[in-house]
Image (tube, rainbow, N blue to C red):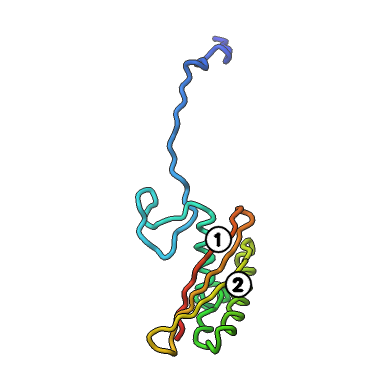
Amino acid sequence: MATISFKSVGRTAETRTTEEVETSPIPIGIKTPLREGSAGEGIWSMNFELADQVHDNLRNLILTNWGERLGSFNFGANLRELTTELVSQENFDSEAVLRIRDAVSQWMPYVTLQDYISQVRHGQQEKTGIIDFTITYDIPMLNVSNKALRVTLYVI
């Protein structure tokens, strides 16, 4: 039976080599709309930064209408019905801001909304149009400020 001390076994600091392993970043979520992924992403294109995933989730929340998300009937800002009842730009803007604020406070409370800017463009016919609005927001937990999201809605 042999008795060996672990202090005298192994490599010295001079002979020890370190090996750096190259790792790919871990994806956080799938980018929407779905598109084919590039090398290292897999089947679908992925978000690797948390701020990008929050931006994608906020856009999906604002563009989703009630009843479109299975299992969560009241998920979304429900803005599509406003486009069919557009009486004036002021009415649309005030109601849209209320709905967006309520949806974000319920589903994404870590996002702080800052500004809302809208613009109406009329299509080929006077009764149809396009509403573009930009929402500026902060994500205090990620130290992200003044990030902008642009959304386009088509008026019937």
Amino acid marked by disc 1:
Lys
- Residue displayed at 61% across by 80% down: 94
Residue name at image x 44 percent, y 40 percent: 23
134 left or right, relative to 102: left
Of the image marks 1 and 2, the number of the one nearer the N terminus:
2
User: Which numbered disc, 1 or 2, marks the residue closer to the eye?
Assistant: 1
Q: Position of residue 11 (x, y in %)?
A: 50, 16
Amino acid type of the residue that numbered disc 2 sits on in the rendered structure: Ala
Residue 91 is tagged as none
Q: Determine whether the residue tagged by mark 1 lies in a helix, strand or loop.
A: strand
Q: How many marks?
A: 2
Alpha carbon separation for disc pair 1 and 2:
18 Å
Looking at the figure, which quarter contains the N terminus? top right
The residue pinned by badge 1 equals 147
Q: Residue at x 50, y 57 (%)?
A: 52
At mark 2, the secondary structure is: helix
Image position of 6 with respect to 83: above or below: above
Residue 65 to residue 84: above or below: above
Residue 6 at x, y = what percent?
Answer: 57, 15
Reading the image, the residue beneath label 2 is 103
Would residue 39 appear left or right of 75 to someone viewing this image? left
